[in-house]
Amino acid sequence: MMNKEDIATKKNEKKYQQANECPITIFMEKIGGKWKPVIIWLLILNKVMRFNELDKSIDGISQKMLSQQLKDLEQLGILNRKSYPVIPPKVEYSLTPKGQSLEPILDAMKTWANDNVLYSK
Amino acid sequence: MMNKEDIATKKNEKKYQQANECPITIFMEKIGGKWKPVIIWLLILNKVMRFNELDKSIDGISQKMLSQQLKDLEQLGILNRKSYPVIPPKVEYSLTPKGQSLEPILDAMKTWANDNVLYSK
DNA sequence: ACAAGTACTTACAATAAAGTAAGTAACTAA
DNA sequence: TTAGTTACTTACTTTATTGTAAGTACTTGT
């Protein structure tokens, strides 16, 4: 026999699962978007990069966007931010193991794009 | 005054990978977004689906959005649209080989999301 | 005194993406 | 005659995302 809390829990459970759609949608919500994949890709290639280096490497990104995306990715546990207490400031970004685990996926995306979009009609 | 590291950095003039026309960005432009990945995933799983079946299978999508995304994917050569001249209308959607070639990527996304987002904090 | 360097933040404007509700066509069964 | 079926389209509104320009902090070099 269920008490009120159990019923509430069960209701919440159902609702939670419905809200938590398909994992591919979740993936896209987390690391999709205009800037996140390319930030991650640059950190895969270069291992450690400073704010300005990322800024210069990503064509068309603004400092505001870069800052925002880096913050998001840090909170997702995908990258590390290491700040040195020097003037002028120095901050280094690098991938966590979780971030590094995206390499095969991004690499597959790269290959797919090269094969199917770049040089095809 | 510059410290040793700064001097070394400047001297080496490190060249970082540039991200314009980056294939990963291209990939995201093509099959990223809110609905395309899940449409493709459903067609991977079910092989052939009708408009209404897709509509019912994708939580929260509107007919307008579904129609638009299907049109985009068809133009990208990712899916086939087969229309039967019957009343009421019957249209079947399925993946082209190009669309099917996305399976390992989407599968990797699914795995990554399950491992790193769903059950972690 | 003043510019330069680095890693940001803030306020505001513009654009892109998505949602809503309704309508359309053509036939068929009640 | 009217409702039901299917695969859409259209007009309009709302929300989300991105862009722009400027400002901040702190210290060193000129």
Image (cartoon, coloured by chain):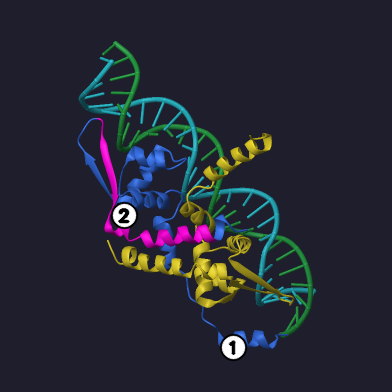
Chain colours: A yellow, B blue, C cyan, D green
Marks 2 and 1 belong to one chain: yes
Q: Position of residue A25 (x, y in %)?
A: 48, 52
Within-10-Å neighbours for mark 2: few <14, some 14–19, many 20+ = many
The residue at the point 46 percent across, 57 percent down is B110
Q: Which mark is residue A20?
A: none
The residue at the point 63 percent across, 40 percent down is A9
Q: How many marks?
A: 2
Please name which of the two marks, 2 or 1, marks the residue nearer to the observer: 2
Amino acid type at circle 1 is Lys
The residue labelled by disc 2 is B78
- B119 shown above or below A41: above
Q: Position of residue B42 (x, y in %)?
A: 37, 49
- Is residue B64 at all visible to an observer of this figure? no
The residue labelled by disc 1 is B11
Q: Secondary structure at mark 1?
A: helix
| Quadrant of the snapshot with the N terminus of chain B | bottom right
For the record, the magenta segment spans B88-115
